[in-house]
Image (spheres, helix red, strand yellow):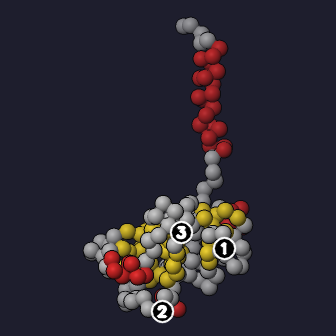
Amino acid sequence: MKSLSPSIRTIAIAAGLLPAACGLLSCHHIDNHRLPVGYVNLTFRTQAEWDIFGVSGAGQHKEFIIQERIPANFPYPATAGTGLGGILLCTTYATMPVAYDLACPVECKASVRVFINEDNEAECPQCHSRYDVFEKLGYPIYGKAAEEGFGLQVYSVGPGPQGEYMRVSL
């Protein structure tokens, strides 16, 4: 059997080392299921309801906290649920609706909720961790959340199974 030329051998060695290098250099795992499971069911029955209460423009956001009736005029049905700390409904810069639990995954308390700061990042008022909610689906970008790999709990947003215009669920 012929031996490989030096250039082919170099390519073969590099190809063999590539999976190991990728494993060492890849991003660490983000835990976005750290919060206790809360009931999530936020339904927008019609497009008109979505136009009033939902988010459609890039970078828009709204909070839904059923226990505090936020927003006050939202028609929460008896079957509604907004997770542990509430729901942060956003529209990404690519104009896709996304939803997160408002509870900070570092603090894991319903009463410690992230808010959108002046840099358009979700920020915890207690630990000051920050998250990218408009491009990177709740990815931690600063603070203890980034150090520990704790991302915001992400919820599903899409048409409802029974003809609802939009629904936020687990």
The answer to which of marks 3 and 1 sits earlier in the sequence is 3
What's the amino acid at mark 2?
Ala
Of the 4 image quadrants, the one containing the N terminus is top right
Task: Tell whether 130 sits left or right of 87.
Answer: right
Q: Position of residue 15 (x, y in %)?
A: 59, 28
What's the amino acid at mark 1?
Glu
The answer to which of marks 2 and 3 sits earlier in the sequence is 3
70 vs 58, nearest the viewer: 58
Structural distance between the alpha carbons of marks 2 and 1: 24 Å
- Residue 5, labelled with which disc? none
Q: Secondary structure at mark 2?
A: loop
The answer to which of marks 2 and 1 sits earlier in the sequence is 2
Q: Secondary structure at mark 1?
A: loop
Vertical position of residue 75 compared to residue 132: above or below: below
Residue at horizontal 52 percent and vertical 62 percent from the top = 93
Q: Quadrant of residue 14?
A: top right
- Residue 72, labelled with which disc? 2
Which residue is disc 1 drawn over? Answer: 118
Q: Secondary structure at mark 3?
A: loop
Vertical position of residue 122 compared to residue 141: above or below: below
Mark 3 crowdedness (10 Å alpha carbons): few <14, some 14-19, many ≥20: some
Question: Does the rendering let one see residue 3?
Answer: yes
Q: Position of residue 10 (x, y in %)?
A: 64, 21
Residue at horizontal 65 percent and vertical 38 percent from the top = 21
Which residue is disc 3 drawn over? Answer: 59
